Image: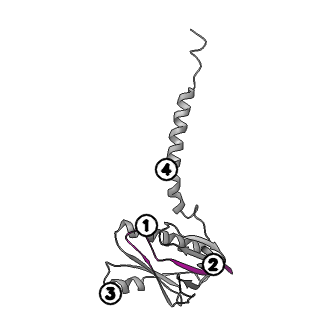
Amino acid sequence: MSKYQDISGFTLIELIVVMAVISSLLFFSLPVFRDVALFSSGTNQAGDMVRLINDLKKRAVEQNADLVMHMDTLSNKVWVTSDHMDAAQKEEAKENSAQLSTDIVVSGVAYPDMPLTDFLELKIRFSRHGYSDAVHIHIIEDQKYVTLKIAPFLPRVQIKEGHVDFEDCL
């Protein structure tokens, strides 16, 4: 027997192929992990709100329905309705709304070409065509000011430190 027949292991080509397969799997799967709470930016409640808004943008296109996120700033509740719901279903959605933590306060909402307002009920529309209303939601969480920037044609919400106006984003 030859002394080379007893050596076992992987060839360089086999290792390169395995590395290429693993790299391509990671390349296509890592963007999916951005929606997982562990990998997304934002603090607890603000991060949950960002994930909800990002999810609504995707769901509106997937379900081919216009969705509306309602936020009652007085009671700190959030609920979602669609254009396919009748009045009774919309009222049921409002009754089953999610309660935001007392640690988060919606201090105001800004729309383009409108002054900062403190609406009692905020509505943000997400279209079946993939766009949404342009809105800045100003929140205070743990005594820290944060602005959630919702842009009409961007797929994700941007989190800005401090109070950011539309003029500051130009």
Sequence-first tag of 1 and 4? 4
In which quadrant will I find the N terminus? Answer: top right
In which quadrant will I find the C terminus? Answer: bottom right
Cβ atoms under marks 3 and 4 closer than 8 Å: no
Q: Where does the image place residue 38, in percent across and percent down from the top left?
A: 58, 62
Magenta span: 124-144
**Of 168 and 53, the residue lying toward us:** 168
Vertical comparison of 75 with 125: above or below: below
For disc 2, the neighbor class at 10 Å (few under 14, some 14 to 19, many from 20) is some
Residue at coordinates 59% horizontally, 14% vertically from top-left? 4
Q: In which image quadrant can residue 164 be found?
A: bottom right
Distance (Cα) linking label 3 and label 4: 42 Å
For disc 4, the neighbor class at 10 Å (few under 14, some 14 to 19, many from 20) is few
Query: Which mark is drawn over residue 28?
Result: 4
Query: Which mark is drawn over residue 58?
Result: 1
Q: Where does the image place residue 139, in percent across and percent down from the top left?
A: 60, 81
Sequence-first tag of 1 and 3? 1
Indicate the secondary structure of the residue bearing disc 4: helix
The amino acid beneath tag 2 is: Val
User: Which marked residue is nearer to the observer: mark 1 or mark 3?
Assistant: 1
Cβ atoms under marks 2 and 1 closer than 8 Å: no
